[in-house]
Image (cartoon, helix red, strand yellow):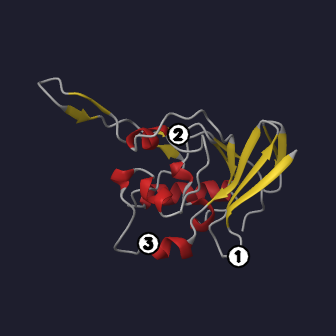
């Protein structure tokens, strides 16, 4: 049985986060920011703490509890148990932040499906942005530590960014994800 769960974008402009489930396949249709909800807690000068992983986002309701969706490094840093992967892909309709802003919080193996135009815009944003959470097309590990080589304590390990799996698909072309075929949205 196919099921849709709306985590955002209903009764508001933006914040689109829709989970499509069909048998063993779980696909997010967009994973964006709710400007209204975000504005209740954050502003230009007060942003979520990168050092808290996704803790601020979950505590304020900006991110829904979706088992197996979020980055393991963020969950581990928050003291949460390891979760088995729970989302296969995100179909990104277009590169507006109300549709794509929270993709960077997802596990690194979650496949992103988008049009060439959306891919080009996200690449440009990623290359020019100075935001804490702007790694849309790459996964940059955080909170990795190892014991100090010279004495007690730990040191932070800076991991290299790795590309996320991305399928760039022509607008309105059908694309297969697990057992589901979805049309990729027209570029807007």
Q: Is residue 26 visible in the rendered structure shown here?
A: yes
Q: Are circles 3 and 1 on residues that touch, CB within 8 Å?
A: no
Residue 5: where, in percent of width, then height?
A: 74, 56
Identify which residue is drawn at 66% across, 42% down.
Answer: 87
Q: Earlier in the sequence, mark 3 or mark 1?
A: 1
Q: In the drawing, does residue 5 fall left or right of residue 75?
A: right
Measured as percent of width and height from the top left, residue 43 is found at 41, 75
Q: Residues within 10 Å of mark 2 (few under 14, many from 20)?
A: some
Considering depth in this image, is 17 or 129 the residue closer to the camera? 17
Marks 3 and 1, Cα distance to the nearest angstrom? 19 Å
Q: Secondary structure at mark 2?
A: strand
Disc nearest the viewer among 1 and 2: 1
**SS class, disc 3:** helix
* Residue to which mark 1 is pinned: 11
**Mark 3 vs mark 2: in front:** 3
Identify the residue under disc 2.
Answer: 163
Q: CA distance from mark 3 to mark 2?
A: 31 Å
Mark 1: few/some/many CA within 10 Å (<14, 14-19, 20+): few
**Left or right: 67 with respect to 159?**
right
Taking 90 as reference, is 52 left or right? left
Q: Quadrant of the N terminus?
A: top right
Q: Gap between marks 1 and 2, in whole Å?
A: 34 Å
In the depicted structure, whether residue 17 falls above or below residue 85? below
| Rendered residue at 18%/27% (across/down) | 148
The answer to whether the residue labelled 3 contacts the one labelled 2, judged by CB atoms less than 8 Å apart, is no
What residue is shown with label 3? 41
Query: Who comes first in sequence, dot 1 or dot 2?
Result: 1
């Amino acid at each position: 049985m196919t099921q849709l769960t709306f985590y955002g974008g209903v009764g508001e402009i933006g914040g689109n986060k829709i989970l499509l489930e069909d048998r063993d396949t779980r696909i997010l249709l967009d994973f964006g920011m709710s400007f209204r909800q975000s504005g209740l807690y954050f502003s230009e000068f007060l942003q979520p703490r990168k050092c808290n992983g996704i803790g601020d986002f979950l505590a304020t309701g900006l991110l829904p509890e979706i088992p197996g969706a979020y980055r393991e490094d963020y969950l581990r840093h928050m003291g949460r148990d390891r979760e088995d992967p729970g989302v296969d892909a995100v179909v990104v309709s277009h590169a507006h932040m109300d549709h794509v802003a929270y993709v960077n919080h997802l596990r690194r193996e979650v496949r992103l499906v988008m049009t060439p135009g959306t891919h080009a815009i996200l690449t440009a944003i990623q290359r020019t942005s100075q935001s804490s959470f702007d790694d849309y097309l790459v996964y940059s590990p955080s909170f990795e530590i190892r014991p100090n080589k010279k004495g007690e304590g730990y040191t932070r390990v800076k991991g290299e960014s790795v590309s996320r799996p991305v399928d760039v698909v022509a607008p309105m072309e059908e694309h297969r994800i697990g057992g589901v075929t979805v049309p990729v949205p027209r570029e807007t």
